[in-house]
Amino acid sequence: MPINISYLLESRTACEREDTADPLLSWQGAFYLPQGLIYLDGNSLGPMPKKALEQLEQAIRKEWAEDLITSWNKAGWWELPETLGKLIAPVVGAASGQVIVSDSTSLNLFKTVHAALTLRPDRTVMISEADSFPTDLYILEGVTSTHQNIQRRLLGKDGNSLEELIDNQVAVVVFSHVNYRTGEILHIEELVQKTHDAGALFVLDTCHSAGVLPVELDQWGVDFAVGCTYKYLNGGPGSPAFIYVAKRHQ
C-alpha cells in the first residue's frame, strides 16, 4: 500500500506548529540536553537542570569544603528533609507538613506498609497488584516474611477485581498510580473509597506520576504515599525519595 507523503508532511508541520506553541517551551532552556536530541526517557532518569551545577558547586565548595560541620545548621542541612518535602508537597497535592524527603522508594514503601499494618492490628491481609513494579513486589514479599501472620492477595493475577478481593480482613491496599508496563493511569480516588469502605488503609506509589501527571493525595484521601525524585522531578542519579503521611495518621 503506497504511503500518503502529503499526510506525513502535514502531520510533521502540525507537530512543529504545536511544539512552537507549547506553553512549556520556555522551560526547555532550563535543562542540559545534547543538541538535536529528543529525550523521552524521563521515566528512567530526568535531565539535569542547569541550576543543579550551581547548587552542587555551592554545596561542595562552600558548605562542605569551607563550612564543614557548621553547615548542618548554617546551610540548613538538618532541616533539608522537611524543607524539600514542603517543595514537593504541592506537586503531589499535599498540604504542608505531610511530605518529607528521605531514603529510597523501597525503604519508604516498607515503612508505610508496616505503619498501615500496625494501624490495623486485627487484620491479616494485604492486597497489591500482580503486575506492580518488581521492586515494589520484592518489598511487599519482605513485609510478609517479617509479619508471618500476614497474607498477600494479588490483584489481577486471575482477572480478579478489588471488589472481589477486599473484605474485613484486609489491612492495607497498595497500588501504583501508573502501570509502568502499559501506561494505564488508575482512578485512585475511586480505589481509595473502596478501600476505606472496607476499613482498610491505602498506600500509593507515585514514582511514575509525580511531576508529570496531576496528583492529589489529600483530595483522593490517600493514607500513605511514596515516590522518587530522579525521574520526573529531575533530582539526578541517587537522589533520595519522598514519603507522604496523611495528617490524620501523624
Image (cartoon, rainbow, N blue to C red):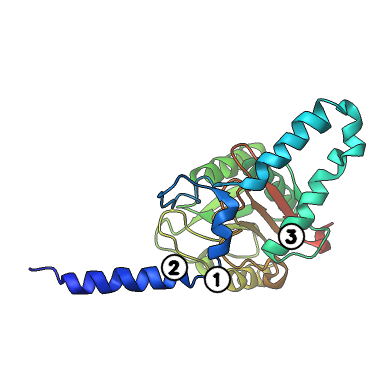
Mark 1 falls on what kind of element?
Answer: loop
Name the kind of residue labelled 3 in the image: Ala
- The percent position of residue 133, horizontal first and vertical second, equals 50, 48
Asked if the residues shown at circle 2 and circle 1 are in contact, with their CB atoms under 8 angstroms apart, the answer is no
Q: Earlier in the sequence, mark 3 or mark 1?
A: 1
Mark 2, mark 3: which one is toward the viewer? 2
Q: Residues within 10 Å of mark 3 (few under 14, many from 20)?
A: many
Q: Earlier in the sequence, mark 2 or mark 3?
A: 2
Quadrant of the rendering where the N terminus is positioned: bottom left
Dividing the picture into quadrants, the one containing residue 75 is top right
Residue denoted by label 2? 19
Q: Secondary structure at mark 3?
A: helix
Q: Residue at x 60, y 68 (%)?
A: 214
Residue wearing tag 1: 23
- In the figure, 79 relative to 249: above or below? above
> Dot 2, crowdedness within 10 Å: few (<14), some or many (≥20)?
few
Q: Is residue 131 visible?
A: yes
Between disc 3 and disc 1, the foreground one is 1
Q: Amino acid at mark 1?
A: Pro
Q: Residue at x 46, y 69 (%)?
A: 20
The residue furthest left is 1
Q: Is residue 149 visible?
A: no
Q: In whole angstroms, how far apart are the C-alphas of marks 3 and 1?
A: 23 Å
Label 2 to label 3: alpha-carbon separation: 29 Å
Q: Quickly name the residue at label 3.
A: 89
Q: Amino acid at mark 2?
A: Asp
Q: Is residue 222 left or right of residue 34?
A: right
